[in-house]
Image (cartoon, helix red, strand yellow):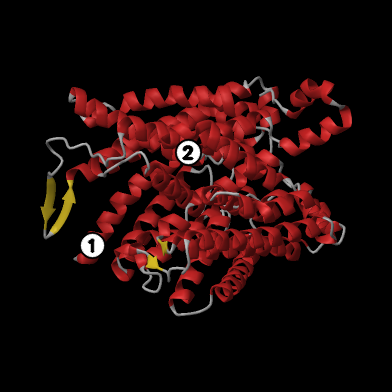
């Protein structure tokens, strides 16, 4: 029974992890940017939901579009105004630039939001289904389902819309895409904005079930690192697989080695995967 | 350069203790920056590992001194241990390129921190106490200053010789084009691993000095990724891959920034972030490159030089 419960917990957690990593994977895959701001977008999305709930009593699940819209615009502006200027420089430059931006934003967030841990506590926060001794918290399930829907939406957008196709074309062959009339600067900014929007929505979801603070962003970021490395880059199925694997590894690692080593196990898997199969489990080009 | 060395040696004889302490911090960051320069600057492999080896060295000194060993002995053991770990990790990790390498080194640093947080020998999250140094504040400020200076001079000299040696040229060749470097007969794996080991030995040694001075260690203090970031930023400010770059960068950041923004200590990390953004956007090649060009072309061409340093890409 214990194993079944842990399995359920792992899958629920894995769904959220996938949702956390998808935007990061998209930005890395299309622009070859290691986006240190990714965790920050998650954190800010969580705070949008938190403040809307706290100040105006908006149900957390209704604030998802708001945090997505706000972060899409911020992401678009950051890419257009700053990152686009150096996106062709050695890839290390974009990494360190987003690191600088992350330091500024997180410091401001600590100033304005304080360093306290916050959780959105709607009236139904403690509801849970239980049968045969298994406990399935309602909020976790809702987050899991919404996270999967969000991931599917992104998949649909990239596969079916004109803009989505332009993004994929840019990823596959930059020069050809440009020759076909794709405005690369704009597509890059849209991609980055999308990554930020998906991250922010994931952050909003996370803020319902988990505690967040301005410095949570590093944790989100390192989870994204691990998930994308396990699953392979720019591949939505890879992010799902990576998320589930990380969820399983962490929960069973905590069971066998003690809860303190839960994160250490995650990093160990990261390093092992890089040793053995640096392209990840499903590393391929394109999004199909 | 010689003048600078003499000034650094004489500094404690005419300075207050807090000035000496300030310079100790500058030296520490300079050591980390020089170390990063081996792998990140010369070889072009973006590493977050300095923090990992800094913490490693700090914990080796803490554990051994607690067991009663001599301080200088623990520095030797700590740096040798750091070098060995770097050797073992470097061989698989250095097969990775670009972002994957960066993530792997980040993973290593975080993994070490999680270990230190959970192992019994490191005292876990509660931290670990070291024996206190005996003697008055004048004595131990100078003791740690000269220890740090010793490590810094060692790191600087090694870097100086490496850049003038076959090894240094080989590393730069790897940075510019690894496949071509291999074609000309450079054993790229060996060279990269040597660079990685060099970039780990000195942080481990500096970590030992830091530990004895702090007298108390917590995993979060020494395995702080910010140490790596600072090393990177200082090197970039001064000039990536140059001999003086890391030192110039460390000096400017730690000293001048302190005077300019001393009033807003709360926002220290935000200012560091702003500086990072400005460096990347406006002086990506560092100050040393600009100074060198100024020497050649004279002050009049300052404007054009600054403009040519800023690469803009039309996308």
User: Residue A223 location, x and y as percent?
Assistant: 42, 49
- Are the two marked residues, 2 and 1, in contact with CB atoms closer than 8 angstroms? no
**Residue at point 26%, 28% (across, down):** A51
Residue neighbourhood size for the residue with mark 1, other residues' Cα within 10 Å, grouped as few (<14), some (14–19), many (≥20): few
Horizontal side of residue B49 vs A108, given as left or right: right
**Residue at point 51%, 52% (across, down):** A229
User: Residue A47 location, x and y as percent?
Assistant: 31, 32
- Pointers 2 and 1 within a single chain: no
Horizontal side of residue B183 vs A88, given as left or right: right
**Residue at point 25%, 39% (across, down):** A118
Element assignment for label 2: helix
User: Residue B180 location, x and y as percent?
Assistant: 83, 52
- Viewer-proximal residue among B247 and A150: B247
- Viewer-proximal residue among A163 and B80: B80
Chain letter of the residue beneath label 2 in the structure image: B
Kindly identify which numbered label has been placed on residue B63: none
Identity of the residue furthest to the bottom in this view: B68
- Measure the C-alpha gap from mark 2 to mark 1: 45 Å
In the picture of the structure, the residue carrying the numbered disc 1 is: A4
As displayed, is residue B222 above or below residue A207? below
Instruction: Tally the marks.
Output: 2
Identity of the residue furthest to the front in this view: B14
Element assignment for label 1: helix
Quadrant where the image shows the N terminus of chain A: bottom left
User: Residue A230 location, x and y as percent?
Assistant: 48, 54
**Residue at point 38%, 58% (across, down):** A263
As displayed, is residue B300 above or below residue B61? above
Horizontal side of residue A128 vs A276, given as left or right: left
Chain letter of the residue beneath label 1 in the structure image: A
In the picture of the structure, the residue carrying the numbered disc 2 is: B269
């Amino acid at each position: 029974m214990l194993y079944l419960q842990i399995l359920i917990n792992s899958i629920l957690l894995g769904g959220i992890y996938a949702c956390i990593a998808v935007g990061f994977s998209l930005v890395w895959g299309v622009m070859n940017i290691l986006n240190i701001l990714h965790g920050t977008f998650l954190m800010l999305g969580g705070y949008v939901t938190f403040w809307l709930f706290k100040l105006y009593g908006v149900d957390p699940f209704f604030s998802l579009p708001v945090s997505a819209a706000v972060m899409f615009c911020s992401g678009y502006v950051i890419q257009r105004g700053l990152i686009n200027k150096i996106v062709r420089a050695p890839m290390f430059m974009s990494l360190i630039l987003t690191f600088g931006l992350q330091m500024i934003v997180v410091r401001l967030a600590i100033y304005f939001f304080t360093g306290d841990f916050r959780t959105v506590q709607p009236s139904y926060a403690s509801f849970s289904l239980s049968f045969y001794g298994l406990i399935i918290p309602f909020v976790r399930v809702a987050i899991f389902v919404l996270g999967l829907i969000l991931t599917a939406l992104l998949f649909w957008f990239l596969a079916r819309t004109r803009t989505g196709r332009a993004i994929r074309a840019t990823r596959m062959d930059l020069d050809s895409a440009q020759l076909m009339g794709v405005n690369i600067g704009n597509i890059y900014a849209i991609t980055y904005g999308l990554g930020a929007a998906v991250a922010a929505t994931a952050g909003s979801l996370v803020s319902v079930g988990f505690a967040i603070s301005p410095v949570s962003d590093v944790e989100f970021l390192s989870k994204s690192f691990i998930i994308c490395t396990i699953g392979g880059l720019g591949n939505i199925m890879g992010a799902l697989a990576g998320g589930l694997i990380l969820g399983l590894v962490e929960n069973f690692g905590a069971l066998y080695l003690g809860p303190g080593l839960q994160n250490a196990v995650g990093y160990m898997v990261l390093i092992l995967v890089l040793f053995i199969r640096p392209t990840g489990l499903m590393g391929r080009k394109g999004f199909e | 350069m010689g003048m600078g060395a003499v000034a650094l040696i004489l500094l404690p004889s005419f300075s207050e203790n807090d000035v000496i302490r300030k310079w100790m911090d500058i030296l520490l960051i300079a050591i980390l920056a020089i170390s990063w320069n081996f792998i990140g600057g010369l070889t072009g492999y973006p590493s977050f590992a300095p923090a990992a080896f800094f913490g490693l060295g700090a914990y080796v000194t803490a554990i051994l001194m607690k067991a009663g060993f001599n301080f200088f002995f623990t520095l030797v053991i700590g740096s040798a241990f750091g070098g060995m770990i770097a050797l073992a990790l470097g061989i698989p990790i250095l097969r990775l390129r670009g972002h994957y390498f960066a993530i792997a080194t980040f993973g290593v640093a975080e993994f070490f921190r999680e270990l230190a947080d959970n192992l019994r020998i490191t005292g876990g999250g509660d931290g670990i106490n070291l024996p206190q140094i005996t003697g008055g504040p004048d004595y131990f400020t100078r003791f740690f200053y000269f220890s740090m200076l010793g490590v810094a001079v060692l790191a600087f000299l090694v870097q100086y010789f490496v850049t003038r040696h076959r090894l240094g040229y080989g590393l730069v060749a790897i940075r510019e084009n690894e496949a071509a470097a291999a074609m000309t007969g450079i054993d790229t794996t060996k060279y990269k691993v040597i660079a990685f080991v060099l970039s780990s030995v000195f942080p481990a040694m500096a970590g030992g000095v830091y530990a004895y001075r702090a007298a108390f260690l917590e995993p979060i203090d020494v395995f702080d990724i910010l140490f790596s970031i600072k090393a990177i930023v200082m090197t970039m400010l001064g000039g990536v891959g140059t001999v003086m770059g890391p030192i110039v960068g460390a000096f400017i950041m730690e000293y001048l920034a302190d005077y300019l923004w001393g009033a807003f200590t709360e926002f220290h990390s935000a200012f560091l972030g702003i500086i990072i953004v400005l460096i990347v956007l406006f002086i990506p090649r560092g100050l040393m490159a600009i100074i060198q060009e100024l020497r050649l072309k004279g002050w009049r061409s300052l404007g054009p030089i600054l403009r040519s340093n800023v690469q803009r890409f039309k996308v």
